[in-house]
Each structure stands twice: as C-alpha cells, then as structure tokens.
Amino acid sequence: MISESARIIALTGAGMSAESGVPTFRGRGGLWRNYEPQQLATPEAFARDPLLVWEWYNWRRAAIHEAQPNAGHKALAALEQTGRHVTIITQNVDSLHSRAGSTHVIELHGSIWKSVCTGCAAVFWDRRGKLSTLPPLCPECHQMLRPGVVWFGESLPPMAWQASAEACSEAEVLLVIGSSGVVYPAADLAPIARQAGAWVIEINLEPTALSSLADLSFHEAAGQILPKLLQ
Ligand code: BV8
Ligand code: ZN
C-alpha cells in the first residue's frame, strides 16, 4: 500500500512520542500529581488555578526539552526522501516531528513552546525548558500568558483543521500512529480518509476506537515498526 502511494498522511498521537520518554495522556506514566490531564487541559482549570496548570506545563516542558526524536519520528521524516508527499498531522505539542526533519507538519493541538497573552493575544515562542517565573507575564501589556495549546472544549485552529481535512480527503494511505482515537475532532480524520478511498493502517500497542476502521493493524511500538515499513 505504501510503496504504491505518492500521498501519505501520518496522524499521530501521544504514543508516537512514548519511546522518546514523553508521558502519554492515558495509561502508565500519563499522570501528574494524581491529576487526570482532562482536569488540567481546560480553560476552566486555567481560570480556577493558573499557577497549577502552568506548573503542569512547566513539568512537561522540562520532560519534552530532554526528549529526542525516536526511530519512528526519523522513519517518517526519511519517508519524504523517497519522493513521496508526506503530511504529518499530529495531536502532540512536543515538536518532535519537526526536530526529526519532517517538513510538512500540522500541529492540530498547538505547541508547548508557544505562549499566548490572555490580555493582548500576542504570541511568544520559547523553546528553552522550564520557564523561570510562573505564571509568565506579557512583556507588552503585563497580563498573564497562557500555554499556546488547544484545551478540551476549545476549537482547533481553523487553518490547521481545514488543511488536515483537505489532506485526508486526498490521501492514498493514512497511518494512524499512537493514538487512542478518543479525542475529537482529530479522530474524525480517519473516517474522512477512508471515505476518500485511502488505505487506513493503524500502528498501536493495543486495539483502539479506530481499529474497526483500519485495513491493517500493527500491534507493535511505533519506533520498532516504522523503520521496518520504511525498508
Ligand atoms: C472541541 C493539547 C468543541 C493540550 C489536547 C464531553 C465533554 C467535553 C468535551 C467533549 C465531550 N465529548 C467530546 C468532547 C470533545 C473533546 C473530546 O474529544 N474529548 C474526549 C476526551 C472525549 N474534544 C475537544 O474538546 C476538542 N475541541 O471539540 O471543541 C468546539 C467546537 C466548535 C467550537 C468551539 C468548541 C479539543 C481537543 C484537544 C484537547 N487537547 N492536547 C496538551 O497537550 O496539553 S488532546 C490530548 O489528548 C493530546 O493532544 C493527546 O495527543 C490527545 C489524545 O490522546 P492520544 O494522542 O490519543 O494519546 P493517548 O494517551 O490517549 O493514547 C496514546 C496511545 O498510544 C494509546 O492508544 C497507546 O496504546 C498508544 N501507544 C503508547 N505507546 C506506544 C503507542 N503506540 C505505538 N507505539 C508506542 N510506543
Ligand atoms: Zn499582552
């Protein structure tokens, strides 16, 4: 399926970065101080306790800053060198696909290195690890900054969603990698690709909500199977 296709899309979730040591949202190691991510990744949690939410993001910034792209990220980047058009649509905010060399990455849920001012909406990028002062304040208007990510209950960046849906409607192969398929609207991209006639290949350690849509499922770690698929 892959060797005959010129347009390939990878829809990736937290499992894509698990072998880089980035904790996933669900399952082992996905918790922080016994909080569920859904409790912290919301506008309500930020309004109620911005310092707690910033401490969680600072903890993740430190973990992600030490993380390196794994063999799976590198295999997806190498797939571009075979002359194919590869689009990476990721739910992850860790920028590991770009760091691995992928050139066409759509960050559906934003980036952990981005902050947005709650007062004047100015955008700031800071790829160092932990921020030194919490909560960070806007250098322009001195209001509080928020993490530049999409929280539960917030709509996705319109451009990112539009580009992802369009890419999936033209895809020949959709690789769904390391996603439990429970978060919407990202999970809707698999049916869109399937309706457009794309092969859907799932790579996940276990069956997921999207398994019924897959033409093929590989129950292996992304960092193990992607280099083999590239061969
Ligand atoms: C929206 C950024 C509406 C932040 C994230 C009921 C109440 C309230 C809301 C809803 C509801 N029902 C549905 C909703 C909508 C909600 C939603 O889907 N909720 C779910 C939980 C039911 N969605 C939203 O709120 C979205 N917005 O709908 O807006 C709207 C519409 C119009 C106008 C206004 C508003 C926004 C969703 C975005 C949330 N932000 N992240 C941050 O990162 O801090 S989502 C978050 O979960 C991460 O992005 C993460 O990637 C994502 C999904 O999780 P997965 O990526 O799938 O990761 P997970 O840990 O779940 O699974 C890992 C998988 O990897 C597992 O399957 C595991 O087996 C596998 N794995 C592990 N290791 C490996 C592996 N696979 C391969 N190899 C390995 N080595
Ligand atoms: Zn400001």
Image (spheres, rainbow, N blue to C red):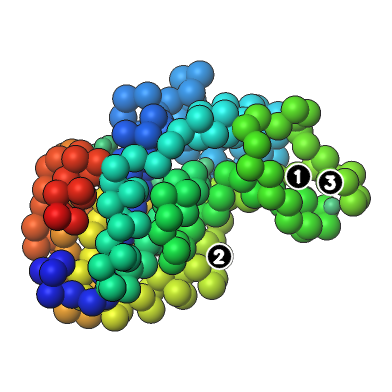
Label 2 sits on a secondary structure element that is loop
Residue type of the residue flagged with mark 2:
Pro
For residue 80, the mark is none
Determine crowd level at label 3: few under 14, some 14-19, many 20+ residues with C-alpha closer than 10 A: many
Residue at the disc numbered 1? 145
Q: In this rendering, does residue 43 appear at all?
A: no
Residue at 25% over, 56% down: 176
Determine crowd level at label 1: few under 14, some 14-19, many 20+ residues with C-alpha closer than 10 A: many
Q: Nearer the viewer, residue 230 or 65?
A: 230
Label 3 sits on a secondary structure element that is loop
**Residue 52 higher or lower than 165, as above or below:** above
* Whole-number angstrom distance, CA of label 1 to CA of label 3: 6 Å
Q: Is mark 1 within 8 Å of ligand 2?
A: yes
Residue at the disc numbered 3? 138
- Which residue ends up furthest to the top in the rendered image? 33
Residue 151 placement (x, y as % from top left): 54, 48
Determine crowd level at label 2: few under 14, some 14-19, many 20+ residues with C-alpha closer than 10 A: some
Residue at the disc numbered 2? 157
Q: Earlier in the sequence, mark 1 or mark 3?
A: 3
Quadrant (top left, top right, bottom left, bottom right) of the C terminus: bottom left
Q: Earlier in the sequence, mark 2 or mark 1?
A: 1
Q: Is mark 3 within 8 Å of ligand 2?
A: yes
Task: Evaluate if marks 1 and 3 touch, with contact meaning CB atoms under 8 Å apart.
Answer: yes
* Whole-number angstrom distance, CA of label 2 to CA of label 1: 18 Å
* Whole-number angstrom distance, CA of label 3 to CA of label 2: 22 Å
Q: Quadrant of residue 83?
A: bottom left
Q: Is residue 157 left or right of residue 199?
A: right
Residue 32 placement (x, y as % from top left): 48, 23
Quadrant (top left, top right, bottom left, bottom right) of the N terminus: bottom left
